[in-house]
């Protein structure tokens, strides 16, 4: 039997996140964590110029250029292992598992408790794309495709729709009446944008 993964969106606000490694994998994780409100620390023997440039925007992100140590794993909620040394990744994955910490070992699916997804944001709506850690390049390509299909102006439309729904709660306190009004809005959008002949 092949088991499926269960897709979720994690609330990482104020969660303690460690990224081990300072290269491309680190930069990818930093981009994904950028607006989550997580407390992030990066530890790596070397930090790439691209990562350093990214971190200039976020002085609150702690960064240390040194080898990672076991005590660095304490009090973490999630750890991303992205060094170019498989032995280091494996060692700290094992230590993290003993401490009950979720681990994502970059490009090493068998040593992951979860996989990062490529995401596309359209205002308050997020799409997540995953290949179960098998081929990150496919996720990235699909993400770019979604970004081309969903133009920037649709972000404002989505924000407006969500604002309308919030306002309708005050205008139409009756749940059933509000539901019918929202259904009519969605049907109008469908007929205008998705069923043109």
Image (tube, rainbow, N blue to C red):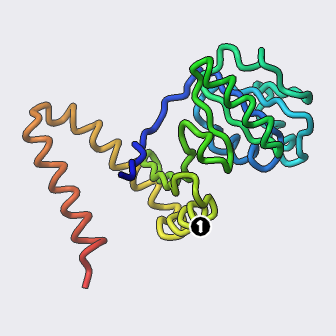
Q: Up-down: is 95 above or below 106?
A: above
Q: How crowded is mark 1: few (under 14 residues within 10 Å), some or many (20 or more)?
A: few
- Quadrant hosting residue 169: top left
Which residue appears at 30% of the width and 71% of the height? 193
Give residue 116's position: percent from left, percent from top: 57, 45
Count how many numbered circles sit on residues in the image.
Answer: 1
Residue of label 1: 141
Left or right of residue 146: residue 103: right
Q: Up-down: is 150 above or below 53?
A: below
Give residue 60's position: percent from left, percent from top: 76, 24
Give residue 136's position: percent from left, percent from top: 62, 58
Which residue appears at 55% of the width and 28% of the height? 12
Which residue appears at 53% of the width and 39% of the height? 114
- Quadrant hosting residue 58: top right
Left or right of residue 41: residue 8: left
The front one of 13 and 20 is 20
Q: What element carries label 1?
A: helix
Which residue appears at 85% of the width and 48% of the height? 50
């Amino acid at each position: 039997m092949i088991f499926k993964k269960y897709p979720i969106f994690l609330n990482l606000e104020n969660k303690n996140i460690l990224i081990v490694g300072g290269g491309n994998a680190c930069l990818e994780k930093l981009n994904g964590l950028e607006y989550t409100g997580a407390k992030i620390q990066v530890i790596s023997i070397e930090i790439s110029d691209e990562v350093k440039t990214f971190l200039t925007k976020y002085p609150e992100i702690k960064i240390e250029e040194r080898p990672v140590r076991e005590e660095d794993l304490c009090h973490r909620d999630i750890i991303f292992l992205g060094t170019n040394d498989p032995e280091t990744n494996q060692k700290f994955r094992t230590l993290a598992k003993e401490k009950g910490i979720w681990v994502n070992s970059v490009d090493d699916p068998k040593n992951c408790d979860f996989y990062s997804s490529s995401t596309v944001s359209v205002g308050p709506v997020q799409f997540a794309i995953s290949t179960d850690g098998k081929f990150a390049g496919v996720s990235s390509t699909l993400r770019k495709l979604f970004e081309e299909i969903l133009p920037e102006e649709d972000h404002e439309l989505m924000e407006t729709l969500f604002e309308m729904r919030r306002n309708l709660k005050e205008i139409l306190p009756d749940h059933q009446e509000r539901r019918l009004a929202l259904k009519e809005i969605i049907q109008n959008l469908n007929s205008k944008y998705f069923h043109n002949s």
